[in-house]
Amino acid sequence: MGMRLVELGKIKATALEAIKESGLKIREQQKNLGISHDKSITEHLPVRYKTLALQAWNDGLITERQCAKFLRMDILDLRILADEYQIESMVSNENIAESGIFA
């Protein structure tokens, strides 16, 4: 997602590198600031709807703000959700590869 922000001109590439090097963890910062993450925000939406909205945002078809509005959340929660979906997708792809279903 960081590269997407650079592509959109929201942050500079040097800032992204600094964030990566610092090892910034969103969840840790939320705890430090006393911000709780409520996953129930998107539980009422179908998984397919969330996936399509995130994919449209990732492909540049809609803006970050539009995606957040579609999913009825603020931008910070959208970014967290996008990170979670990206991790879930990577794990899912690894499981498919290991199972040999498409071999």
Image (cartoon, rainbow, N blue to C red):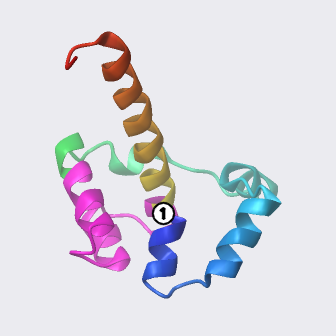
Please tell me whether residue 33 is drawn above or below residue 4 in the rendered image.
Answer: above
Measured from the top left, where is residue 68 in percent x and y? 35, 69
> In the figure, 10 relative to 48: above or below?
below
Q: Quadrant of residue 24?
A: bottom right
Amino acid of disc 1: Met
Residue linked to disc 1: 1
Residue ID at (48%, 61%): 79
Q: Is residue 32 magenta?
A: no
- Count of all numbered marks drawn on residues in the image: 1
Is residue 64 covered in magenta? yes
Q: In this view, does 17 lie to the left or right of 63?
A: right
The residue most toward the bottom is 9
SS type, badge 1: loop
Residue at point 49%, 88% (across, down): 9
Side of 103 where 11 appears, left or right: right
Work out which quarter of the rendered image holds the C terminus and state it: top left
The extreme front residue here reads 103
- Where does residue 84 sit, x and y in percent of width and height? 47, 45
Question: Which segment did they paint magenta?
Answer: 50-78
Q: Which residue is at 44% across, 71% downward?
A: 4
Task: Indicate whether 58 appears above or below 28.
Answer: below
- Name the dominant secondary structure of the magenta segment: helix
Q: Which x, y percent locates residue 3? A: 50, 69
- Looking at the image, which is closer to me, 42 or 83? 83
- Classed neighbour count for the residue bearing mark 1: other residues with Cα under 10 Å, few (<14), some (14–19), many (≥20): few
Which residue: 63% across, 51% down? 36
